[in-house]
Image: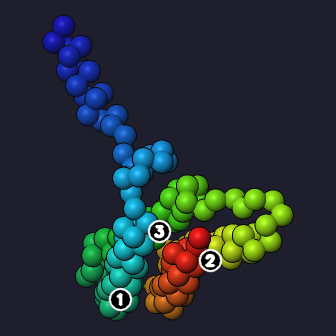
Amino acid sequence: MKMYAAIALVLLVFSSVSVFGHCEIPCGIYGDEERFKAIAEDLKTIEKSMIQIQSLSSDPNNHMNQLVRWVNNKEKHADHIRDTVAQYFLAQRIKVPTAGDAAAEEVYSQKLSLLHKMVVYAMKCKQTVDTENVKNLHKYLDQFQKLYQNQP
């Protein structure tokens, strides 16, 4: 019996699953402002990571552990941006306009375009240490936030 309990405990500990911050149920717990702030924080972290990677790359043999940690950090925050855009904004907050409402369809198209650009530049942030990608991502975040917050 003790062996079964030990096996069950080991399975429980090692088979745990990551829990994500948003369940895609419109519960109202997560607010738009908090999502925009979180993305802005992710951008700051990505930029700092890029700068550290560039600095430590001058002597990679002595800084390999730190380089790996900064790369992982950069990628984690870029993934967080992509997840927020897809799971929060695209899946839940951006509503499909009524057919025939040309003005609403135009705004919808603009939002989709900006969110797509954000996803693309988040990917570019993962691929490179070029801080121009962070600047572009920040630009598209600002444009999307203004458009999103001015919706009726």
**Does any portion of residue 131 appear in the rendered image?**
yes
* Residue ID at (55%, 60%): 93
* Residue ID at (59%, 70%): 152
Q: Residues within 10 Å of mark 1 (few under 14, many from 20)?
A: some
Which residue is under mark 1?
51
Could you tell me the amino acid type at mark 3? Ile
Q: Residues within 10 Å of mark 2 (few under 14, many from 20)?
A: many
* Snapshot quadrant of residue 45: bottom left
- Dot 3 or dot 1, earlier in sequence: 1
Q: CA distance from mark 3 to mark 1?
A: 19 Å
Could you tell me the amino acid type at mark 2? Leu
Q: CA distance from mark 1 to mark 2?
A: 26 Å
Q: Total marks drawn?
A: 3
Which residue is under mark 3?
81
The N terminus - image quarter: top left
**Does any portion of residue 75 appear in the rendered image?**
no
Which residue is under mark 2?
114
